[in-house]
Amino acid sequence: MKILLYAGSLKTVSRSGVGEAIRHQREAMERLGVDYTMDEQDDYDLVHLNTIFPDSLRMARKAKRKGKKVVYHAHSTMEDFRNSFIGSNLAAPLFKQWILRCYRSADLLITPTEYSKGLIQAYGKIPPIVSLSNGVDSAFFAPDAQAGQRFRHKHGLSGEAKVVISVGHYIERKGVLDFVELARRMPDHEFYWFGFTPLYMVPAKIREAVETKLPNLHFPGYVNREELRDAYCGSDLFLFATHEETEGIVLLEALAAGIPVLVRDLPIYAEWLEDGGTVYKARDLETFERGIRGITERMLPDLTGNGRELAFGLDLDAVGRRLVELYSSTLHSGTEKLKAQVVRPEA
């Protein structure tokens, strides 16, 4: 069995969650010794696609003509396309039709969670679909005091400073407006948002938010995974105020790094993230502020051990083994048996 991890348009998504998911897949194949290539000119038995650009649909059709199997990773939904870039809400119905066209080219769809699986199934007729976490490198994203000290030293932060971080594109869906408002309300905390989006791509209110001048609000831009790990380890809280997700790789990284996590109370996190068990949840600015203070002032119980245990269950080794099982089933026994299967490592 040889897998083609299709690399078309990889540069376009390299700084996104999809780019990180592809890196996870490569890492999993290498750890497990699975034969794979990223060169479409090589011989292969099955192609695994992650992006929804026209070149990926072309690759799927080319593979089908050659009698190859196609696995499509359904990272995108109409719901998480909304409230992102200029015109995204108007284009959302067309986006839905496009991703369906891409996804219907597959023999098997993989999506990160049962929540995103349900959304896609509701769109209409699709190939068999299973849920499988994107996973996390829990050995790399691990508690590390020295890493935390590097972060604080780089940014001139004292050991007593209360630091809140978030990670993502500068888009409304990710909660950047609430992040800025919380920084305004809480001048005694330092707020760092890691990630980058060209400001010409986002609405005026997002540009204005990112350009807000507050002494405790920082937008360092995109950082590599080593610097991001340092930031997790050197912060007091990971704030995930996102309004819609298919999973959230950065959330898994924060849990693995042993940092307290405060998320928006969303349907996707209703069952597998317990409020007061693995994370804390909030619904609006007032409850976010209370949650932040409760965590950073140590008034709420420490849940980081539980969060790291959850992340261990979604480690790349476990996810990679499930992925290889899916490849093998798709190649050798068809996909009929996969129609009702849920494939998600136990947390």
Image: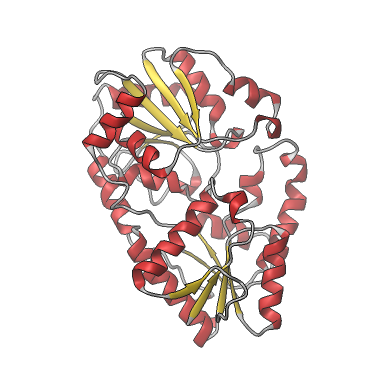
Total residue callouts: 0
Q: Nearer the viewer, residue 33 or 307?
A: 33
**In the rendered image, is residue 44 in sight?**
yes
Residue 327, position as x, y percentages in the image? 48, 76
Q: Nearer the viewer, residue 296 or 223?
A: 223
**In the rendered image, is residue 112 in sight?**
no
Q: Is residue 135 left or right of residue 113?
A: left
Q: Is residue 246 left or right of residue 57?
A: left
Residue 101, position as x, y percentages in the image? 73, 64
Q: Residue at x 67, y 71 (%)?
A: 60
Residue 132 falls in image quadrant: bottom left
Q: Is residue 137 left or right of residue 47?
A: left
Query: Does residue 47 sit above or below 333 in this rendering?
Result: above
In what quadrant of the picture does the C terminus appear?
A: bottom left
Residue 39 falls in image quadrant: bottom right
Here the colouring is secondary structure
Q: Is residue 325 left or right of residue 17?
A: left
Query: Does residue 345 sit above or below 222 in this rendering?
Result: below
Residue 195, position as x, y percentages in the image? 51, 36
Query: Does residue 253 sit above or below 280 in this rendering?
Result: below
Q: Residue at x 66, y 58 (%)?
A: 52
Q: Residue at x 60, y 33 (%)?
A: 172
Query: Does residue 239 sit above or below 347 in this rendering?
Result: above
Residue 54, position as x, y percentages in the image? 73, 60
Q: Residue at x 37, y 74 (%)?
A: 33
